[in-house]
Image: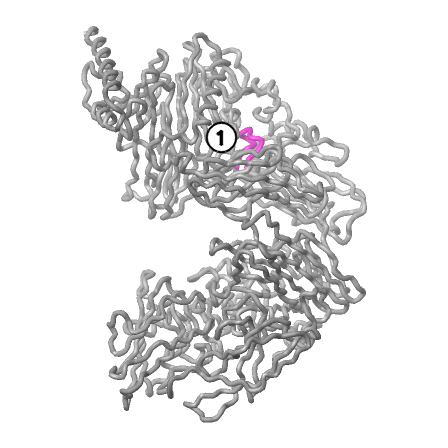
Amino acid sequence: METVRQWSWVLGILAMLALLFFLPDDGNFAKISVRRALRSVTGSNNGLDQMLIKTKNQVVMNNGIVRLTFSYPGGDVIGIKYKGIDNLLEIKNQENNRGYWDVVWNNKETGGIDKLQGGRFKIITARADQTEISFTKKYDISRGNTTLSMNVDKRYIMQRGRAGFYAYSIFERPKGWPGLDIDQIRIVYKLQQDKFQFMAVSDDRQRVMPTADDRSNGIKLAYPEAVLLTNPSNPDLRGEVDDKYQYSSEDKDIKVHGWICTKPAVGFWIITPSDEFRTAGPFKQELTSHVGPTALSMFVSTHYAGKEVGMRFASGEAWKKVFGPVFVYLNSVPSLNESALWENAKEQLVEEVKSWPYSFTQSEDIPSSSGRGSVAGQLLVRDRYTSKSLVWASSAYVGLAAPGKAGSWQKESKGYQFWTQANEQGHFLIKDVRPGNYSLYATVPGIIGDYKYKSDITIEPGNEINLANLTYVPPRNGPTLWEIGIPDRSAAEFYVPDPNPTLMNKLFTTNRADKFRQYGLWERYADLYPDEDLIYNIGTDNYGDNWFFAHVTRNIGNRTYEATTWRILFELQDLTNTGNYTLQLALASATNAEVQVRFNDQSAFPPHFTTGLIGKDNAIARHGIHGLYWLFSIGVPSYRLREGNNTIYLTQSRSLGTFEGVFALPFSFVISTYVVIDNGIVRLKFSYPGGDVIGINYKGIKNLLETKNALDNRGYWDVVWNRDGGKDVVDKLQGTGFRVITERADQIEISFTKTYNVSLGNATLPMNADKRYIVQRGRDGFYAYAIFERLKGWPRTNVDQIRFVYKLQQDKFPFMAISDDRKRVMPTARDRANGKPLAYPEAVLLTKTNNPDLRGEVDDKYQYSTEDKDNKVHGWICNEPPVGFWIITSSDEFRTAGPFKQDLTSHAGPTVLSMFASTHYGGKEVGMTFKDGEAWKKVFGPVFVYLNSVPSSNNSLRLWENAKEQMLEEVKRWPYNFTQSEDFPSSDKRGSVAGQLLIQDRYINESLVWASSAYVGLAAPGNVGSWQKESKGYQFWTPTNKQGYFLIKDVRPGNYSLYATVPGVVGDYKYETIIKIKPRLGINLGNITYVPPRNGPTLWEIGIPDRSAAEFNVPDPSPTLRNQLYTNHTDKFRQYGLWDRYTDLYPNHDLIYTVGADDYHDKWFFAHVTRNTGNNTYEATTWQILFQLKNLTTTGNYTLQLALASANNAEVQVRFNNQSAKPPHFTTGLIGKDNAIARHGIHVMWVRIIPLKVATNTKISHISSSIRTQQLKPEGGTKQKV
């Protein structure tokens, strides 16, 4: 029988050789091989040396060097035969505890460890040179939350002539599956402990290891992973501590690690050629190999970071990711030589890295190199406090990860990440990047903070993106006075003590660089500072010797711990009384910690600053010298400091356990150079050189602005822009240059400039901005304006919003006033946060308010919008002391889209806005679009920020009346003659246009009639009505008097068209000739006549042609969704949810209007919207107009004039006497993006449509209109006038 088996083996080899020789490699061979491999094998045939064999319970891969055995259909690696060792894996273990994948997961109901047992086996490819197999685990959706809601495809690849195999997995969640949290994904290999006793993780971390039995016989220490070896099989290990976390590494350094068998001399290595599928960036620490002997390939874990880096999937969220491939490499030498095996493994690593991305995998989810892209550039650092010129970001780590905020990559786990290290000159190349959308991030050794490129980057196959020069400006407010440590995301430079002599790991007694990996170093703080905490003297102490690496609690015995307070002593000369200081506190790790900071007063309560409870990374216990990175910039008012000696108290206040604390990164103390202007009434503080308003001191209130906000989130300009309609980007216009424009006894004007760097192309806003502020002696307030400019040749861009924002103290300003009839006590930002969001985020039902009178109301910032012509003064009132904060806009010349354009004013926050340009109530059509190379310049403002006060809060409403009086004074002074910019012409450098507008409508009156109360204006030359979409130029409007006379004065020089719109008269007027304004030129046009577009007398009319739907039936709101301000108010249309009232009023049939019998005030619903049919479903609606037509004219046509006051993703179809006519007799097509229905605007842009001529033989009995709905309710619909 033995002879038969031997000859069967020979025959098997001969057959394989014959196949290899005679069959061409054209795909047929793979099919033959698969069929042969799947053929049932029994008896002596089990020993055939085929590449792939499947039996009832096992799958075997054998390339003649390595023989792998897998469980079937589970897909665990249960055997690895190599160099005469029948199984490298621990045969004493159960088959599912040798080589396996596992996932640690949970959801709201359950969780656990899933070893991903496959339910189906498949051969992906079987060729002479390579076999790839698959074991799949499918989620059963009927089981809901009781099991891991994930499909997993485990793949293994074996290649001819290779000493090892590849492993990877494809994880996938289709849309609609339950929510899920995943904290760990890994591959585990458990080797024979009798054979593998030498472990190598890096060049300087290699050693003979204890066995699992040695650990079982030892003494457990503070946590189960740490064991004191008391009776090991190798006596040299007695008295040492073993802990798997001592062998962790950063992901960027985990390339190869493993174990060595002594007899025979064999190595088992896990090689990871790429980090792209790992999580949380290059510095994330992970386990490698540890006692077992166990070798790990960690893909996802919460080690050294906590739950923040776990994967969190929302209910219904779809996702897919490939983990791997990794290469399990086996090697051997004739006689034991650990160094030779290790060096050979490193050589193999280099070869694998060269081969990445692998081209031999058969999954479409792993793109080859040709299906990927690259990003290159040079990163520079601009820190004007250390160098006047740009410096190279030498050795910076630059990476691509999922779009997010600066530094968000360290918590990102669901996407792919691609990192590289820049060279000495800061040049970098990130190659072989998977297609997708990314942000580009960087961190520079020795430079504090995180860099993020301003624009997202889209990678497509074959892309080679060169970003050229990128500049990182570290977060600094001034020069550094002193610093403790190095900003390198690690605490390694600080004092790391020697361990307790009885708790050592000898590996780290010689490897001093990794001394922090010794066990129990946290307890050494109490040994070194038993009674008094650490005191550090700036100027005399050295952080390498005197700053303990971890700020921990003190063990005072009986499992009791106390908080610790460290002191920093420093001397401050020449205290800056007019500026603030900043303490930058960086933490390399935090575990259930709270750092409280106090300045010169240890007992101050509350502390001057607290981090709050932060961190779950447990890096102190796990011997990681860092975890997640935290950076806090703490503003220090100069009054908290002293000339001479000062003390900073740092308290780690949480003291429930031994591992609670932080790893401290550098402390830097910076003098913040602010710009302060004080006229004796108002004291303004600006960030430098950013130019944000960060402080307004008035009437005993140290800061009217919200001091809880970051400095750049108090008083600032911002611009919303994009390129080619892409993702919007917000630029807060942080200045890089500062200068004093004028400084006189009566006035100061200052400038903060932001200059576009043309080398950055489209990566940043292609616009220069000069932000100006003016303070005058004796004035309660200040002026603000900005000059925006694009030079010729700059790239195209779209600008959707320009504004100035002030965020006031919410604890002081409860009362808002916009107009005489729109004044009220407002909810706070906290009230809104505690409320219930409605159909869109801006609308909130107030359910839990600080002021009980507001409970049950709806708050929505759009309820307080106003037409630009009426937006002259608005603001907030503080009750105690009674102070008003007002924005006064003296002119509309710099606003956009004409006098009827609606915009935001003030809203809950309390927030005060000065809106200069926006797409609100107009859509993208009113945004500013600049072509490639287009030059442009415009001045926005000045506006006046007016402050006032009264002696008693009993008369606080007098503040509103006074603000209106001040507004009239500012209007009289316009155009201001005190601005110092040549781009703002004074009155004597402007011109004027006068005339009388008359109406000629022969179907109403044979004589000319006055165009009473018409609005007449000058705007950029264009078509009739184009002014309502014009945003790049200046506009000048005025109402006519009763006789139609008008005077448009103080017009900037330039070319204009003259436009007009007349209340009650349909259509738009445009003067036929371009008007050229010159300085001091007064033009009188005399009488000009508007002939409205009519083809005959009006038979009937519904509504008034006034560009608004206010005259129609505006219903009462739902009783549960009211804003009390608009109860019994002329602006009832500003109530929330009125669009849904149509369904309430017309639940089963649509509106029918009978001409001659019905009144449009009562019968014509103000907005033609969809009907809500439930379950987020909406249907089109068809209204009918019924009318009688006597004396039908058979020799002429009729015209229906349809005017729309607003449209949002709408299509109005019109049919005459045939509701089913296809196509309709007329359609507007899809029109509008103004969203006025949701935003409580009774109009937006005026659209007049006169397309229809009705044949003389058509009998007209009704007209129907319907809307094609493209979005959910509150968005689709029109406001109509017929």
Give the residue type that dot 1 points to: Glu
In the image, is residue 254 above or below residue 971? Answer: above
Question: Horizontal and vertical percent for residue 938?
Answer: 61, 64
| Near-viewer residue (818 or 1194) | 1194
In the image, is residue 57 above or below residue 401? Answer: above
| Residue position marked by numbered label 1 in the rendering | 286
Q: Can see residue 756? A: yes
The dominant secondary structure in magenta is: loop
Question: Horizontal and vertical percent for residue 282?
Answer: 52, 34
Q: Residue at x 41, y 33 (%)?
A: 185
| Near-viewer residue (656 or 1169) | 1169
Q: Is residue 67 left or right of residue 448?
A: left
The residue range painted magenta reads 617-627
| Near-viewer residue (1040 or 331) | 1040
- Say whether residue 622 is magenta: yes
| Residue with the most extreme top position | 3
- Looking at the rendered image, the quarter that the N terminus falls into is top left
- Say whether residue 1174 is magenta: no
Q: Is residue 920 left or right of residue 103?
A: right
Q: Residue at x 35, y 24 (%)?
A: 97
Question: Horizontal and vertical percent for residue 198?
Answer: 47, 15
| Residue with the most extreme front position | 1073
Q: Can see residue 1150? A: no
Element marked by disc 1: strand
- Looking at the rendered image, the quarter that the C terminus falls into is bottom left
Q: Is residue 682 left or right of residue 878?
A: right
| Residue with the most extreme bottom position | 1006
Q: Is residue 832 left or right of residue 755?
A: left
Residue density around tag 1, few if under 14, some if 14–19, many if 20 or more, within 10 Å? many
